[in-house]
Image (cartoon, rainbow, N blue to C red):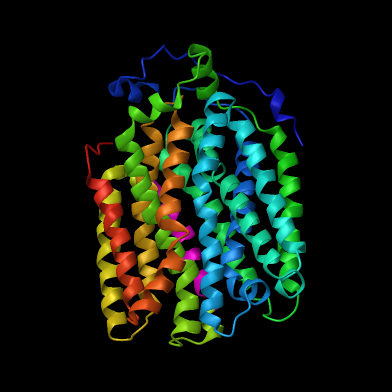
Amino acid sequence: MHNLSRQPIVTQNLPSQDISKPEDLSKTLIIQSPVSVDKPIFLISVFGTVLEYFEYAIYGFLAPILALHFFPSDDPTTSLLKTFGVFALGSLAKPLGALIFGQVGDTKGRRISLRYSMIGISVPTFIVGIVPGYDVLGWKAAFILILCRLFQGMFVAGESDGVRIYIFEHFGQKRPCFTNAFVVCGSYIGIALASLVAAFIPMEGEAWRLVFLGCSFFGIITFILRQFLVETPPFLAYQKSHPLPVPLKQALSTNWAPLMRTIMICGMIGGSYHFYMVFLSTYLSKVLGLIPTANASLYGFWLTSAYVLTLPLAGWIADRWGLARVAKIGGGISLALVALDTIMMVKGLAFFSLPLLITVGTAFFALPGCTFLIQHCDVGIRFRCQSLGHAVGSMLFSGTTPAICLFLWQHTGLIYSPFLYILMLVGMGLGALVWGDWKR
């Protein structure tokens, strides 16, 4: 493998900016010359994202199995609810991780942040794979599982946004949305693979432990490979012209509106994912019994695959037609389809075609909106604002979605009550998109 750290980095100096003035923020977007290390950098970065999201998502797909080992109960629904509750705890730790890795990324560099976020999520994954279940340790087993999930959430907060920013600052000068699409694809490929692997793990036995142990092994390999990453030209140029980092309070106070949009949009994206690609298959098969379990096992895989295949097309179209225009169309279509899906559930009908179309529409909403937010945030505060906004949105609306939806069904008895919740989330995301001056 080539030692990428010795490759030349071509940068341009950025003029000093007073970032306390919001109008100056758009002046420090990407200013760079092409570098000659694109393929190795891209592959190492995206592979880490695939693995990290596989590790993070496999818990959700194996929730019914983990419920038997860590939360045994006479009521399967109660046991599953506890497991989804632990799943949601991972999101609660994300804001802390975002603050830590955002600070590291904006002061020490994107490269360092990406290296240590990788090893941080692999260690808890390894522990989950070896810790005995409730039958051996009792409540201590569940407590260890909770701690591991909290640490996973904290470290994953530094991964997805960090990689998107890293790739964007290296290669996003001409086609920002299209380039970002492949980074997002990496995370969803990891999710899709987790769904596929989980479909072949039997409920009985200890085979599920091999999945967690294998993930942690590849995490160490990726940590080693990421030492070959080089720092992004925009960050190096910004650091040279701004030797003192921008205080967090100043960064957030001058960018509160983009931060709120990030929270709302990322909350909608994460909530939609957790609803349609993690929760829905379990809800329709094991809770309602509307679809066979055999079909439900591959439900998340096919939906995630459709989303991944749509993302590059959505990125290409958004770069040509405008980010805001494409995002509004995608958001409007998604909202209409979710409303139709809700009406179908009121009648007790479940059609695979509707969730499939919703995932496609969401791709045209999510990708342009997130790319716009990255593009219009100053280099010196970009990592903190993006990661914190994403983490807060995830904490409030993303990983909590399965637990909230199952709670709504339990306490209302209405099979369509979870769909009303996701309808609210999509409306929130669309509202954030049209809020303010959204110009390309």
225 drawn magenta: no
In front of the other: 164 or 33:
164
Which residue sits at x=33%, y=86%?
348
Q: Residue furthest front?
A: 139
| Residue at position x 77%, y 72% in the image | 136
Question: Range of the magenta residues?
Answer: 297-316
Measured from the top left, where is residue 228 in percent x and y? 71, 33
Which of 149 and 245 lies nearest the eye of the viewer?
149
The image position of residue 12, as x and y in percent, is 49, 15
Residue 215, placed above or below residue 29: below
The one nearer the camera, 355 or 182, is 355
Predominant SS of the magenta segment: helix
18 to 428, vertically: above or below: above
Residue drawn where x is 75% and y is 59% of the image: 214
User: Is any atom of residue 333 visible in this view?
Assistant: yes
- 224 with respect to 300 (left or right): right
Residue 305 is a magenta residue: yes
Image quadrant in which you'd find residue 118 = top right
Specify the quadrant that holds the C terminus: top left
